[in-house]
Amino acid sequence: MRWSKSGGHGDTRGGSRDGGAGDAGPGGPRGYHHGNLRETLIRAALELIKEKGPAGFTFADAARWAGVSPAAPYRHFRDRDALLADVARRGFDQFEAALTRAWDEGKPNTFAAFDRLGKAYLDFARREPAYYSAMFEAGVPLDADPGLKDAGDRAFAVLRRAAEKLVLQAPEKERPPALMVALHIWSLTHGIASLFGRGDAARRTLPMPADDLLEAGFLVYLKGLGITAPR
Amino acid sequence: MRWSKSGGHGDTRGGSRDGGAGDAGPGGPRGYHHGNLRETLIRAALELIKEKGPAGFTFADAARWAGVSPAAPYRHFRDRDALLADVARRGFDQFEAALTRAWDEGKPNTFAAFDRLGKAYLDFARREPAYYSAMFEAGVPLDADPGLKDAGDRAFAVLRRAAEKLVLQAPEKERPPALMVALHIWSLTHGIASLFGRGDAARRTLPMPADDLLEAGFLVYLKGLGITAPR
DNA sequence: ATCGCATGTGAATGGTCTTTACATGAGCCG
DNA sequence: CGGCTCATGTAAAGACCATTCACATGCGAT
């Protein structure tokens, strides 16, 4: 509707790098060439997914949001799915970074770090629902983007490394495979995030904070592994 | 006119005057009035979701599959979402039935019954991906259909009743809330089903069967609760 | 300063969704 | 039996979206 609002907007040209606050808005000031369309399209996708769900945005929507013609996005992405796959890949990158930060090499102790890790997972799902949707719920094929699978693997690797440190605390006799532990933790956390993670009115509500539910689950599970929390 | 463009999914419909009570076409003989369009549309939705995912089917698709004009479905469902919500509701009904059957009132013992319950959950996700998608992944609002929320609650209630029996086996001193246990189990199982549940090439593969991963998780969790498997 | 090429535009094509006015026939009531 | 009514289905029309193609623009290399 507003993609050709050329009437207004005295666009000062000259490689206008829109670093300002207007960055978040549709149709930033620009000349014939957008200058940063690829990035803007990804931002548009994130906005639109956040608003209407991963299925609720179209390629044309993204173009409109970015203030370009409906054909412009094709210069940057083969189609809508390619854009979504790129969003998912970036999501995994950020996810990995967030998890790595939370884990912080297991400091000050494995237990506390693990707790942070779980909270960071849920926090990411809450704070970046668009990324999370693209990563896990949009049904993006793993090979839709070069590096998508690798990005996902790298994110999981953080969890797996954490699990490796964790199982070292279990009694040597009954030490479980770290991979299995990582998968259990991932599944439990993803399940909570997926079922109750977001305050979304469309979803089920919980009689307790999701963080607490996860932490309690951790504690029980770790106890089952023979690991007790340092008190 | 023939609405089916002869393309597509080898549909058993079309002009087939099947008198053979085939379940594939309850509508059977087709005059001006279909006779059973509502049911046929739901069946169409299930077929199409199974093939192309919950986002990959359209109202017009369902109409084409059923062999009616694109406008006909609007006589039975307000829009595509209403159809999806109805599918989700029926899915929860079937889900509840499957879980109830698996639980079988906890016979012969709580432990074995719980194991069956988990496997039935994963089995449902595998065997009825269309229902499962509509129930959990399609983002259908809980109030999109009268009775949808109740149907979901009834399904969860099965799990919760099972959890109540389960916690009775925990040492009385540290008996956890059944609701919390039910939520943990649900989350873990849903997480596994959601991440690895289906052999879908688009998803990640697992170094072990999903059933085994779940069972191992159960065992660890129950041990953490102070419940030990009867040997 | 010029030129090539990446990037963006406009228009055209073909498909889909959704609504509206009209058609059909099943069930009901006399 | 006959007519009425209403649920159900059809046809056609309008709007939107995806995709492509010829063309325009101007950035950056030379």
Image (tube, coloured by chain):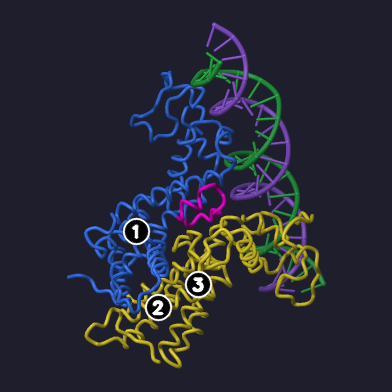
Chain colours: A blue, B yellow, C purple, D green
Q: Position of residue C17 (x, y in %)?
A: 60, 50
Q: Amino acid at mark 1?
A: Leu
- What percent of the width, then of the height, locates residue A135? 47, 53
Q: Disc 3 marks which amino acid?
A: Ala
**Residue D21 location (% of width, % of height):** 70, 30
Q: Is disc 1 in the same subunit as disc 3?
A: no
Front position in the image: A196 or A75: A75
Quarter assignment of residue A103: bottom left
- The span picked out in magenta is A136-153
Q: Quadrant of residue A23?
A: top left
Circles 1 and 3 in contact, beta carbons < 8 Å: no
Pick the residue in front: B131 or B120: B120
- Circles 1 and 2 on the same chain: no
Query: Which residue, given by chain and number where applicable, does mark 2 sit on?
Result: B218
> Residue B211, image x and y in percent?
50, 76
Q: Amino acid at mark 2?
A: Phe
Of residue B178 and residue A185, the one placed in the foreground of this image is A185
* Badge number at residue A122: 1
Q: State how far apart marks 3 and 2 are (Cα).
A: 12 Å
Label 1 sits on a secondary structure element that is helix
Magenta span has A151? yes
Crowding near the residue tagged with mark 3, few <14, some 14–19, many ≥20 C-alpha atoms within 10 Å: many
For label 3, the residue is B210
Alpha carbon distance from label 1 to label 2: 22 Å
**Above-or-below relation of B95 to A13:** below
